[in-house]
Image: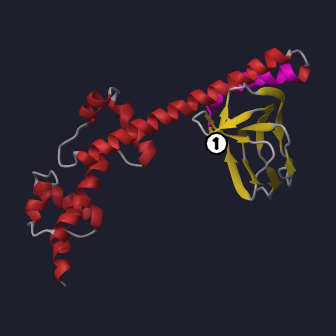
Amino acid sequence: MTLDFSPPPEFLACSTKVFEPGEIHVTRVCTQKSVLILMRDGVLRFREDGKIIELCAGEYYIQRDNLLQEGVPLEKPPTYFYIEFCGSYSEEERLPLRGRFQAKTLEPLLGIFEQLFQSHNGSPFLLNAYMNRVFSELWTEASHHDEQAHITRLIRNDLRSRYAETVTTEELAHRFGYAGDYLTRIFKKQYGITPHQYQIQVRMEHAQWLLDNTGLSVEQVADSVGYRDFSAFYRSFRKSTGISPREWKQKLYQ
């Protein structure tokens, strides 16, 4: 489910919400209006149709209309900016209901937006324009994240298909058209390890399978998974499994 923009959302209200100690999210059903929450500080937690939703600083969430939201206890009073609006939703790829945003980009916009609304100096057309700028920034960030996820999946699949080859960062940069440092950074952000570490991980998986299921010698297995230097294979295997490749093979016959 995503927020659709046809017809475009209609602005209703906006403000900063600062929770007092011990305060919890209000229990309610928002009829005929949705709420965009942009987290600034703390942790907001509530139950929506029985499911716990937890939001931290830098995250956004869209509460859809006609869903029951119930407050639950909070450890640290949260602060967030919210926008109430009328909107429609779609199963097609539009703005995700949850994601992250760049505070340094949105905060100046939110400050002006709130001032216009609170001072009653903004026309409905102007207030809708500011709201749509907020949605546009969120959509841009979501699209950027989707692009990164797509690139890292392509890199992962490429490394899995060519695990026995020596794949350098420079080759990946040339193949995918991005700087090597950038590819390494987004890959590690997605999977927790660098492309080089991932290739070693895949090699070790295949090496273990070959030792378990074939009659190949340890030296032949090392060559099959791309190691021309047996000592490098030995070090990688021991680091991955805690034992040497010969010990791994021997345990099959115990």
Q: Which residue is mark 1?
A: 1
Q: Nearer the viewer, residue 208 or 7?
A: 7
Image quadrant for the C terminus? bottom left
- In the rendered image, residue 72, in percent from the top left (x then y), is placed at 80, 58
**Residue stretch in magenta:** 100-117
Q: Nearer the viewer, residue 102 or 133?
A: 133
Q: Answer whether residue 108 is visible to the viewer in this image.
A: no
Magenta highlight on residue 222: no
Side of 198 where 80 appears, left or right: right
Q: Determine the secondary structure under disc 1.
A: loop
Magenta portion: prevailing SS class? helix
Packing grade of label 1 (10 A; few <14, some 14-19, many >=20) is few
Residue farthest along the bottom direction in this orientation: 254
Residue 157 vertical placement versus 143 (above, below): below
Q: Amino acid at mark 1?
A: Met
The answer to which quarter of the image holds residue 252 is bottom left
Residue 208 vertical placement versus 132 (above, below): below
Residue 233 vertical placement versus 176 (above, below): below
- In the rendered image, residue 57, in percent from the top left (x then y), is placed at 67, 42
> What's the residue at 64%, 24% (across, down)?
136
Side of 234 where 101 appears, left or right: right
In the rendered picture of this protein, how many numbered marks are placed on residues?
Answer: 1
Q: Nearer the viewer, residue 40 or 211?
A: 211
> What's the residue at 82%, 37% (across, down)?
33
Q: Nearer the viewer, residue 162 or 232?
A: 162
Side of 189 where 198 appears, left or right: left
- In the rendered image, residue 37, in percent from the top left (x then y), is placed at 74, 38
- In the rendered image, residue 36, in percent from the top left (x then y), is placed at 74, 36
Side of 50 where 146 appears, left or right: left
> What's the residue at 89%, 15% (across, down)?
121
